Image (cartoon, grey):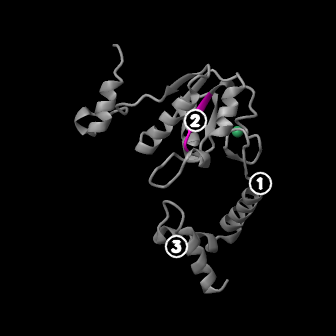
Amino acid sequence: MAHSDIDELIRLFSRLPGLGPRSARRAVLTMIRSREQVMQPIHNALGKAMENIKTCHICGNLDMHDPCVICSDDKRDDSTICVVEDLSDLWAIERCNLYRGKYHVLGGTLSAIDDRGPSQLNIEPLMARVGDGTVKEIILATNVTMEGQTTAHYLTNRLNGYNVNISRLAQGIPMGGELDYLDDGTLGAALKARLPF
Ligand SMILES: [Zn+2]
């Protein structure tokens, strides 16, 4: 490998989130030093993923199968759909190991600044899913950001008139959180969403 090829690898790696130029150099160094043990398996896995990853036509999840493993799992509850902005949010909720319903991945949020409207998100397929009568609850698990909340409001309006319960994730004080260290927004939201004792 000519030196410039190695530089190109480092340049590509440093574009990944969490890897600056320094970590990219170290990652590439590890790979080229252990070609058999590290580089070849990565090369194979990347090639396979590149060829086989598909977007699930039902929920928008990315998986090796379409429909994805979650949509085709009949042990999961069809009547609940958790709506998330992005794949990373779906993964985060799956890591909790508590949710047994299905998902819908929007692929972003509505954003006036970025000129992103409803037609650019995976919304119509969601409406089609809700329209077929199986769904009883929609959990709006968009982020607690301006765009996330705008998107949740938009969806609430769109879902108005369908026979579904709409819920959203509770907002409040994180486990181990001390009031004095919370930002005003978090504390205010927790106060508004207070529960009977
Ligand atoms: Zn799916």
Name the kind of residue labelled 3 in the image.
Arg
Q: Which x, y percent locates residue 2?
A: 65, 86
> Which mark sits nearer the N-terminus, 2 or 1?
1
- Image: 194 above or below 68: above
Report if residue 139 is visible in the image. yes
C-alpha distance separating marks 2 and 3: 38 Å
Q: Which x, y percent locates residue 151?
A: 50, 39
Q: Which residue lies furthest to the left in this view?
A: 180
Label 2: state its secondary structure: strand
Find the magenta span and give its range.
Answer: 81-85
Q: Dot 1 surroundings within 10 Å: few (below 14), some, or many (20 or more)?
A: few
On the image, which quarter does residue 78 sit in? Answer: top right
Label 3: state its secondary structure: helix
The residue that label 1 is drawn on is 52
Name the kind of residue labelled 1 in the image.
Asn
Residue at screen point 50% across, 54% down: 115
> Which mark sits nearer the N-terminus, 3 or 1?
3
Label 1: state its secondary structure: helix
Q: In this view, does 110 lie to the left or right of 105?
A: left
